[in-house]
Image (cartoon, rainbow, N blue to C red):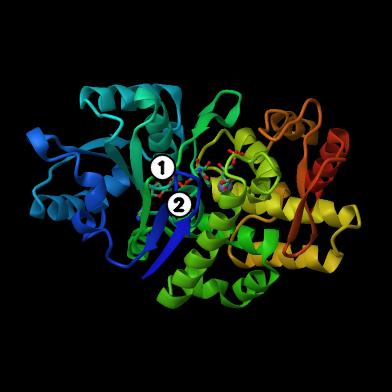
Amino acid sequence: MAVIPVSLAGRSYDVTIESGVLDDLASEARGYLNSFGKNGRAVPFVADNNTHRLYSEAIERSLSGAGFAADWFVVDPGEAAKSWPMLEKLTDWLLSLRVTRSDHVFAVGGGVVGDLTGFACAVTKRGCGFVQIPTTLLAQVDSSVGGKTAINTRAGKNLIGAFHQPSAVLIDPLVLGTLPDREMRAGYAEVIKYGLLGDAEFFGWLEANGNKVLSREPDALSYAIATSIRAKARIVAEDERETTGVRALLNLGHTFGHALEAETGFSDRLLHGEAVAAGMVLAARYSARRDEMPQEQAERVTQAIAAAGLPSEISALGMQGTGDDLANHMRHDKKMESDTLPFLLLRGIGEAYLARDVEMSDIAAFLDEQLKAH
Ligand SMILES: NC(=O)c1ccc[n+]([C@@H]2O[C@H](COP(=O)([O-])OP(=O)(O)OC[C@H]3O[C@@H](n4cnc5c(N)ncnc54)[C@H](O)[C@@H]3O)[C@@H](O)[C@H]2O)c1
Ligand SMILES: O=C(O)C(=O)C[C@@H](O)[C@H](O)[C@H](O)COP(=O)(O)O
Ligand SMILES: [Zn+2]
């Protein structure tokens, strides 16, 4: 078991990593269940069809043993649930349950369920509590921690949202046993991100042990999850609201990645983690093209992504769009300052930095080359 604190003034919380935590939810989450149970109020849980089917029974068993009942809001799996219509339905449901600011809503699922639930909790009665129970590798290493919550709009990814920290994050690595391999690989992209952005040693460890993580070897998996969360907790504690440039490092690969997601229609044609993987390769290659990252290190990045079965070549994604089309999606990036887009680039493996001198026309030309290459 590992407990990793996320230290934030007045909003600190723990991330608990423990096999079996889900079967024992009533005792693990006792403090967040206490406002329920009186007057027969059920505890609100949000899940998608898959996580509801797989894990609602164990959760209900644990809760009923402690005298609590669960009520479920279940969405269809996939990115489409991060939408205005779903936000409206979810907030209406929370209001119908008479959720109060001192209550906690439980999010059981991947980043989609976590981002949607977190945002609904941020705006319901101007902020009620929530607990993250992440069930994908991506959510366990990244989205459940740090309080970024959002939905997507026609204009792009995560454009409507809020910073709203969870009160606790409970991670059960055993649930990854039911996660499809493709989703496991997508989450692994965000694990690679932590090595690439600031921890060359961890990147090297992943080059040697990535297959153990992907095959869910318990020690390797727990080490990768804990190392990722420690890195994220450190960064979030330093720059909770992404104002100093430190938290922006967590966006490595995302400016390219979000544009690729937009171009492929936010669909399962390209999952978020897959887009981030391709985006990190682009960031490494563009950095090498500027002579900032040694070419041989950019090749190591491509290798690490490809070896994990993640997309490394955007020319193979079957997209119709041009470099300009992708650059146009990027103009909605939340890092945009006036008419400049700061870009996460690399001086080397483990050394990401925010570059403020990148011309969008140069990015578009680079992307045109990449769309044609290989
Ligand atoms: N808030 C943040 O800081 C942050 C960070 C990274 C990503 N995100 C967001 O997270 C989202 C992607 O999250 P994701 O990759 O977890 O995708 P997801 O939530 O869509 O889940 C992926 C799939 O796995 C299924 N699933 C979940 N847990 C399972 C389990 N244990 N067993 C079997 N199936 C399971 C889901 O039903 C779904 O079909 C994106 O919207 C992305 O923008 C947010
Ligand atoms: O927590 C962060 O900060 C991140 O940037 C984590 C990313 O993996 C995540 O995808 C995030 O939602 C992207 O940030 P956004 O602000 O561009 O939506
Ligand atoms: Zn991400």
Residue 153 in the image: x percent, y percent? 54, 25
Residue at mark 2: 139
Does 198 appear above or below 262? below
Q: Is residue 80 left or right of residue 248?
A: left
Q: Amino acid at mark 2?
A: Ala
Check mark 2 vs ligand 1: CB closer than 8 Å? yes or no. Answer: yes
Quadrant including the C terminus: bottom right
Q: Residue drawn 51% across and 60% down? A: 229
Q: Amino acid at mark 1?
A: Gly
Q: Residue drawn 37% across and 61% down? A: 16
Residue at mark 1: 114
Quarter of the rendered structure image containing ligand 2: top right
Q: For the residues labelled 2 and 1, say whether their Cβ atoms are less than 8 Å apart.
A: yes
The residue lying toward the viewer, choosing from 238 and 73, is 238
Give the CA distance from mark 2 to mark 1.
8 Å
Q: Is residue 300 left or right of residue 12?
A: right
Q: Residue drawn 28% across and 36% down? A: 74
Q: Residue drawn 12% across and 45% down? A: 68
Element at label 2: helix
The residue lying toward the viewer, choosing from 10 and 120, is 10
